[in-house]
Image: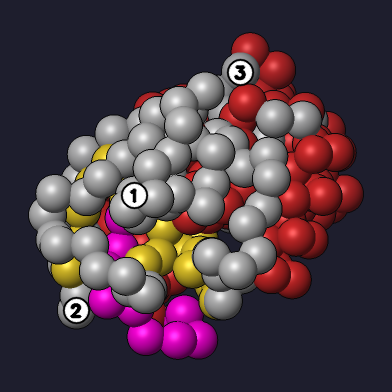
Amino acid sequence: MAQAQAGDPFAEYALADPFIPCAFLWQPGMRVAGVDEVGRGPLVGAVVTAAVVLDPQYPIAGLADSKKISEKKRLALEYEIKTHALGWSLGRAEPDEIDQLNILHATMLAMQRAVAALPLDVQAVLIDGNRVPSLPCLAQAVVKGDGRVPAISAASILAKVARDREMHDLHLRYPQYGFDRHKGYPTAVHRAALEQHGALAEHRRSFGPVAAAIAQGNLF
């Protein structure tokens, strides 16, 4: 693990891959939000985003890409993030917005909504990936940022926990689709359920397997 230097922006966190922003000049005391999304690939439900501003006085151990830690660990970290962060928020774009805009533009919209919902002003935003939505502040995309920048890791955890809860709730309503297992992704189980039971109102109609089911008259 790399050793942080005193002047590094994230010196208070034990990063395996230290990151220094280049799209803006880091200044001590700068409030920077990390932003990430969950749910671009599923056939059902919203794409969910989160924005997090961590508190340097309360570093949170164990922050990492949400996909690489267990559900139990994610839930524990969710509590710590919501308790100790300077601010956090969620954003989303619904299935009908995804169908109207396409998944990329809907994801950008959901990120804008998360940043706008933050309970405090920020000077800059770091976003996981390689694209940046239009924002009223400085912003930079960070490839694999959910494993490099603590605030982005925190955002990925909040977004995943929130969306997984939504999939659990959807499972309780429609247990025959198996949403508690595949979380809406186009697995063989999900595709078979689409063919057998039809598309739900929550399904994304612009996505191929859902469009095919609807074309065959398969509606729940």
Q: Is residue 208 left or right of residue 187?
A: left
Disc 3 packing (10 Å; few <14; some 14–19; many ≥20): some
Amino acid type, residue under disc 3 in the picture: Thr
Q: Residue 18 is drawn in which quadrant? A: top left
Q: Nearer the viewer, mark 2 or mark 3?
A: 2
- Tell me the element at label 3: loop
Residue at the outermost top position: 188
Mark 2–mark 3 distance (CA, rounded to whole Å): 38 Å
Q: Is residue 87 left or right of residue 129?
A: right
**Residue at point 67% right, 53% down?**
60
The residue beneath circle 1 is: 8
- Tell me the element at label 1: loop
The residue beneath circle 2 is: 136
First in sequence: mark 1 or mark 2?
1
Q: Is residue 34 magenta?
A: no
The residue beneath circle 3 is: 187
Residue 207: x %, y % from top left: 39, 35
Residue 118: x %, y % from top left: 47, 80
Q: Is residue 163 visible?
A: no
Q: Is residue 120 magenta?
A: yes
First in sequence: mark 2 or mark 3?
2
Mark 1–mark 3 distance (CA, rounded to whole Å): 42 Å
**Residue at point 85% right, 38% down?**
72
Asked if 95 appears above or below 149 in the picture, the reply is below
Specify the quadrant that holds the C terminus: top right
Q: Which residues are magenta?
A: 117-126
Mark 1–mark 2 distance (CA, rounded to whole Å): 25 Å
Q: Residue 145 is drawn in which quadrant? A: top left
> What is the magenta segment's predominant secondary structure?
loop
Residue at the outermost bottom position: 120
